[in-house]
Image (tube, rainbow, N blue to C red):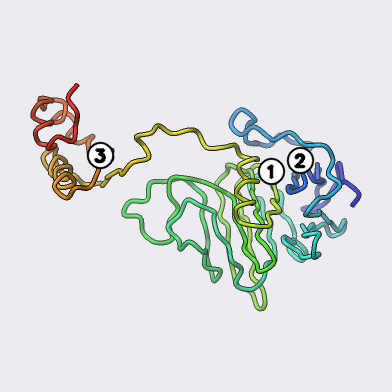
Amino acid sequence: MKPVSSLWVFFTRQRFLLTPASPSSDTRIHVKITDPDNSRYQVPESVFPRPSSESPSYHPKIEFKYTESPFSFSIVRKSNNEVLFDTAGFPIIFEPQYLRVKTSLPLNANIYGLGEHTESFRLPTQNTTRTLWSRDSYGVPPGSNLYGVHPIYLEHRTTGTHGVFFLNSNGMDIKLRNDGDRTTLEYNVIGGILDFYFLAGPSPIEVAQQYAALAGLPAEVPYWSLGLHQCRYGYQNYVEVSQVISNYSIAGIPLETMWTDSTCAFWWTALVLIPRSRLYVRASGIYSRP
């Protein structure tokens, strides 16, 4: 495959720069479309450090292909020439406050990710819209967006698993639809640029490892955070909290941490006025004395 270092592409009546579109490792391809004539917001390097490109790959597991006019691109698994991502037939839109990219997938595609949400683990492909916009969804109703935003999905096929990570922090809807003999996945974004990383897999574990190499490893957590935690919204007072802790002790269930969520803001003064010795007694010995 001949690497593509940069390419002028034309859609929405303007020109844009696609760069780079060559493997940055054996298992990763970076596709980035920017507007060279106008400044657009990108996730800062200080927030999300970009991986350094490795030496040019001579054995890439996935390949970038494109059509100049009308412009479209695809990502293909080299071992079997299977198309993993394909925008053909769906014009790319790249306006200042609206971006759209749409791809064809196999019918009833096995899509996972695009969190944080309350959908089923495997995302339904019939008329599902995943909104990526951080919020506290009271009551956690089904189909809701939650605190985290992770614009990455994994697609499982009988031939292997791959991942698609979209580096864009603007609000977006990602639509999954069954359309005849195929499923489509469509990004609708309110700003920024098109900045995709395609991860070859071909196993789920390898996709996770490739994403960790791209996004960074999780921070080490304190030992106590690995234990059992109890949290609920709606505790009325410290007495109720201490009763919950006591019940864990009576049942012989080890409890490492007790959370009171945001309810504590309403009765925080009551907590700070409680003598520590009284709280210790009510907690049935769960708390250690200072």
Tag 2 or tag 3, which sits nearer the N-term?
Answer: 2
Residue at coordinates 16% horizontally, 44% vertically from top-left?
249
Q: Give SS at disc 3.
A: strand
Point out residue 13 in the picture as x, y percentages from the top left corner. Answer: 80, 51
Q: Give SS at disc 1.
A: loop
Hey, what amino acid is under mark 2?
Asp
Inspect this view and state whether residue 94 appears: yes
Point out residue 89 in the picture as x, y percentages from the top left corner. Answer: 76, 66
Location of residue 65 with respect to 37 vertically, above or below: below
Residue at coordinates 80% horizontally, 61% vertically from top-left?
79
Name of the residue lying farthest toward the bottom: 180
Inspect this view and state whether residue 262 appears: no
Residue at image mark 1: 193
Tag 3 or tag 1, which sits nearer the N-term?
Answer: 1
Quadrant of residue 231 within the rendered picture:
top left
Within 10 Å of disc 3 (Cα), the crowding (few <14, some 14-19, many 20+) is some
Q: Give SS at disc 2.
A: loop
Q: Is there a contact, CB below 8 Å, between mark 2 and mark 1? A: yes
Name of the residue lying farthest toward the right: 2
Residue at coordinates 65% horizontally, 53% vertically from top-left?
164
Quadrant of residue 144 within the rendered picture:
bottom left
Residue at image mark 3: 258
Point out residue 195 in the picture as x, y percentages from the top left corner. Answer: 69, 44
Residue at coordinates 60% horizontally, 52% vertically from top-left?
205
Q: Nearer the viewer, mark 3 or mark 2?
A: 3
Hey, what amino acid is under mark 1?
Ile
Point out residue 190 in the picture as x, y percentages from the top left corner. Answer: 60, 47
Name of the residue lying farthest toward the front: 252
Q: Is residue 173 left or right of residue 275?
A: right
Residue at image mark 2: 35
